[in-house]
Amino acid sequence: MRYLSYILALAALAVSPLMAEDKIELPPFHHIVGVKPSDAIKVPNKFKLGDKGELICATCHGLKDIDKTPIDEVDKEAADFLVGGHYRNLTGLCYQCHDEQKTQRENIHILLDEHGEIKKKQCTYCHEEVPDRDKKLSIAELKLRLPME
């Protein structure tokens, strides 16, 4: 299961929705800017970095002066909205710099291993403890970590 977009959204929220010096609020699912990529990130030459080697709007976007354009006026359908053109999936852009193999995780919904045994760790993503598979349990007995909805 791919979750890089989710991680980028969380990273953006964790840092702050206000990133640029002039306090432009970035849209959801947006990459952070103003930071230097770590050694684990390999930014291709076609992606511009700022004067200090930091991520800027033009790192991912090819539109001229996108950082000076009001967000609601940015042409998201333009061929150069994302550097390299349109991508089938947004992760196609992400994997230009991020290692695809290192951003994968196991699908937590695959609960059984190759021998039909429960992967107990998978259960505890949603449940406080591993439910008894052989017993019919009520909703309360499932001990969910979050409400059903």
Image: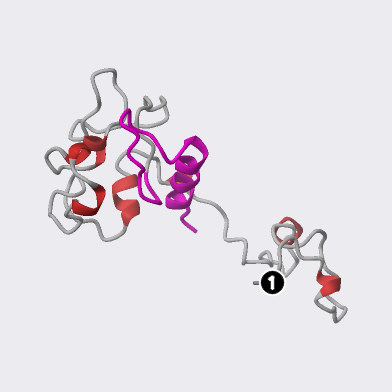
In this view, the residue in front, 35 or 135, is 35
The answer to whether any part of residue 103 appears in the image is yes
- Please give the name of the residue rendered at 17% of the width and 46% of the height, measured from the top-left corner: 84
In the shown orientation, is residue 117 left or right of residue 47? right
- Please give the name of the residue rendered at 45% of the width and 41% of the height, measured from the top-left corner: 12
Q: Main secondary structure of the magenta part?
A: loop
Image quarter of residue 115: bottom right
**Disc 1 residue type (three-letter):** Met
In this view, the residue in front, 106 or 19, is 19
The C terminus is located in which quarter? bottom right
How far across and down, in percent of the image, does residue 57 sit? 25, 37
Please tell me whether residue 41 is drawn above or below residue 137 in the rendered image: above
In the shown orientation, is residue 103 left or right of residue 62? right
Residue 33 part of the magenta segment? no
Residue matched to label 1: 148
How far across and down, in percent of the image, does residue 101 sit? 45, 45
Image quarter of residue 32: top left
Please tell me whether residue 1 is drawn above or below residue 25 in the rendered image: below
**Label 1 Cα crowd, 10 Å radius (few <14 / some 14-19 / many 20+):** few
Please tell me whether residue 50 is drawn above or below residue 73 in the rendered image: above
In magenta, the rendered stretch is: 1-30
How far across and down, in percent of the image, does residue 13 sit? 49, 43
Residue 22 part of the magenta segment? yes
- Please give the name of the residue rendered at 76% of the width and 62% of the height, measured from the top-left corner: 127
In the shown orientation, is residue 103 left or right of residue 36? right
In the shown orientation, is residue 33 left or right of residue 108? left
Element carrying mark 1: loop
Please tell me whether residue 143 is drawn above or below residue 84 in the rendered image: below
- Please give the name of the residue rendered at 34% of the width and 45% of the height, measured from the top-left corner: 95
